[in-house]
Image (spheres, rainbow, N blue to C red):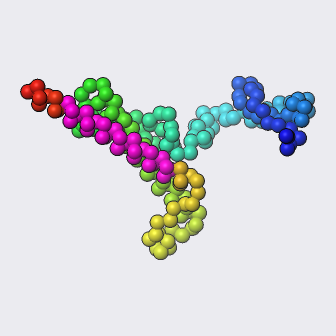
Amino acid sequence: MQHFPYKLTPEYHNGGYYKQRRNVNGNVSQKQIEANRRNAQFSTGPKTDEGKQCVRFNALKHGLLARTIVAPSRNNHETQAAFDNLLGAFREELRPEGLIEEMLVEEIAVCYWRQQRAIRVEAGEIQQLQDRCGREDDNAYNDTLALPNDSDVYKITRYETAIEHRLHRALTQLDRRQKSRRKCRRARGI
């Protein structure tokens, strides 16, 4: 049963994904095709390097689910060098031996890195709430923790919890492996 006079279906057009209106019969009208082509002439994106730099973070919301470990940011909170230093510090402290322990140390570093990102994102959400309310100078307001009541903060909290679980699991697995390795060495007299 169709409730609308048209249906939305995915189509590929000039290498991009978009939804196109179709009439009840499933056909796209010639008028719609011509309108789409005319409108496409106006949405060609930024041309200059400066314009491209301005819009390169448009789709980035918080970076908590980023595929890369070091997420790009406008204010360079994260750099590859800083992550490499953190990973080096974890390697020095935890002293992994073998591929699996090395993998667990990297997981610990990644989880810690993302946990710090989540804290920055959450702080930014709280700051935005305060800015929207316009009460930065109100001491009574600032003395209470006011979290924004929206789905973004809820998602951030869920991500933080998931990251904490991954971090705890990796630390526990590494600890067990290292204890087992030390126990085996003591038994062999090494």
* Image x and y of residue 14, in percent: 74, 25
Residue at x 67% of width, y 32% of height:
47
Look at the picture and state if 165 lies above or below 8: below
The magenta region covers: 156-181
Q: Measuring from the top left, give residue 170's x and y in whole percent.
A: 34, 38
Residue drawn at (16%, 32%) of the image: 183
Quarter holding residue 188: top left
- Evaluate whether residue 41 shows in this view: yes
Q: Is residue 162 magenta?
A: yes
* Quadrant that contains the C terminus: top left
Task: Tell me which corner region of the image, top left, top right, bottom left or bottom right, holds residue 56.
Answer: top right
For residue 146, above or below residue 101: below
Image-based side of 33 in relation to 186, left or right: right
Q: Is residue 39 visible in the rendered structure shown here?
A: no
User: Total label count?
Assistant: 0
- List x then y, in percent, for residue 72: 49, 38
Magenta residues, dominant SS class: helix
Quadrant containing the N terminus is: top right
In screen coordinates, is 97 left or right of 30?
left
- Which residue appears at 67% of the width and 35% of the height? 46
Residue 81 in percent (x, y) is at 37, 35
Observer-nearest of 77 and 15: 15
38 and 172: which one is in front?
Answer: 172
Q: Quick one: which residue is furthest to the left in this view?
A: 189
What residue is shown at x 45% (from left), y 48% (from top)? 160
Query: Does residue 121 show up magenta in the picture?
Result: no
**Of 183 and 19, the residue lying toward us:** 183
- Asked if 180 appears above or below 122 in the picture, the reply is above
In-front residue for pair 72/103: 103
